[in-house]
Amino acid sequence: MKRYYFDIREGDHLARDEEGLMMRDIDAVQKEAAQSLADMARDAVSGRMLFRMAIEVRDGTGPVLEVCYLWQIRRHAR
Amino acid sequence: MPADMMIRRLRVNSVLSEDDAAALRALPSTVRDLSEGTVFVHEGDRPTRCCVIMSGFAFRSKVTADGKRQILSFHPAGDMPDLHSLFLEKMDHDLATLSHAKVGFIEHQHVNGLIEKRPAIARALWRETLVDAAIFRAWIVNLGARSASARLAHLLAALRQRLAAVGLAADDEFEFPISQAELGEALGITAVHVSRVISHFRNSGVLDIRRNRVRLKDFERLVEIGGFNELYLHQQ
């Protein structure tokens, strides 16, 4: 088990994770990050629309992984 | 005595005479100190006794086929979270401690004896299971139809009202010894998402959760965010 920090980027704003989470391995980190981003995207879609969100994960020494999503809506002119 | 918190809890929803309270106090019971995370009733068990939470917190949960745990309800002191085992033979979920907890156990035969002799107690226990079901209906709406921040707001507003009714929340502050991972298991979101929601609430001055203690700084705002209406708790 090792401590990882999940920083959250919403638009231009980066919220730094000060506490971190103990995770088993990098696969568990990826799963937590991806699932969290999907959760947040779901809320963003029905609330305040955010077209770019990302989770940047680091450990004590530096960045280890990043997941991001881009949301696009195109209305066709009729 | 497990009976004191139980009587306090039952009197939130029902009228009990001093005779009824004395009969509850006379129930023979065994008290156990359980450490954090102890599953003390398992799915599939055939319990022969009911439990009363005397201090600390317990929770109900179920685990899916792929190992994911869903927390179904939280139970502070005074609650009797396995009353249904009086009439339903096999447990259909687990019951565990969230923190170090003191739990009293009362043999079914003694509770059944009281139910037969004292209709007011029978009605009070029945009301208790009806309110329990109402809490589950609210939980379903919370998980199925609200955003993550509204889910947490609703959960904490409801918990505050239930704790205040039995004298366990003063000045909008109460003990709630829970990790972010466990909150996630209750709210159907990840620990990282829970952490983000809490830090939003902290930054906007709505609430703070630190070292197992919840501080509600703006209860009205919390009620509004969670769409919380206490009617379903039927507290009199």
Image: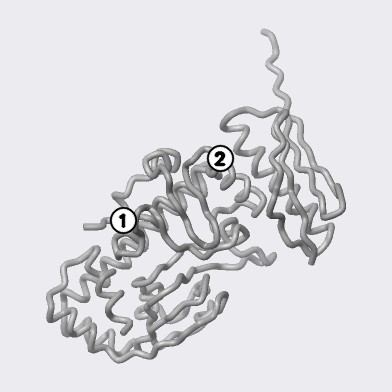
Q: Residue at x 38, y 82 (%)?
A: B50
Mark on residue B203?
2
Judged from the image, the secondary structure of the residue bearing numbered disc 1 is helix
Q: Position of residue A19 (x, y in %)?
A: 68, 54
Q: Is residue B43 above or below residue B139?
A: below
Q: How is the image coloured?
A: one colour
Q: Earlier in the sequence, mark 2 or mark 1?
A: 2
- For disc 1, the neighbor class at 10 Å (few under 14, some 14 to 19, many from 20) is some
What amino acid is at disc 1? Leu
Between A46 and B18, which is closer to the camera in this rendering?
B18
Q: Are marks 2 and 1 in contact (CB under 8 Å)?
A: no
How many marks overall?
2
Identify residue for label 1. Answer: B233
Horizontal relation, residue B82 to residue A64: left or right:
left
Please name which of the two marks, 2 or 1, marks the residue nearer to the observer: 2
Question: Is residue A77 left or right of B205 when viewed as pictured?
Answer: right
The chain holding disc 1 is: B
- Chain where mark 2 sits: B
A59 or B153, nearer to the observer: A59
Q: Residue at x 34, y 58 (%)?
A: B170
Q: Are marks 2 and 1 on the same chain?
A: yes
Q: Which mark is residue B122?
A: none
Amino acid of disc 2: Asn
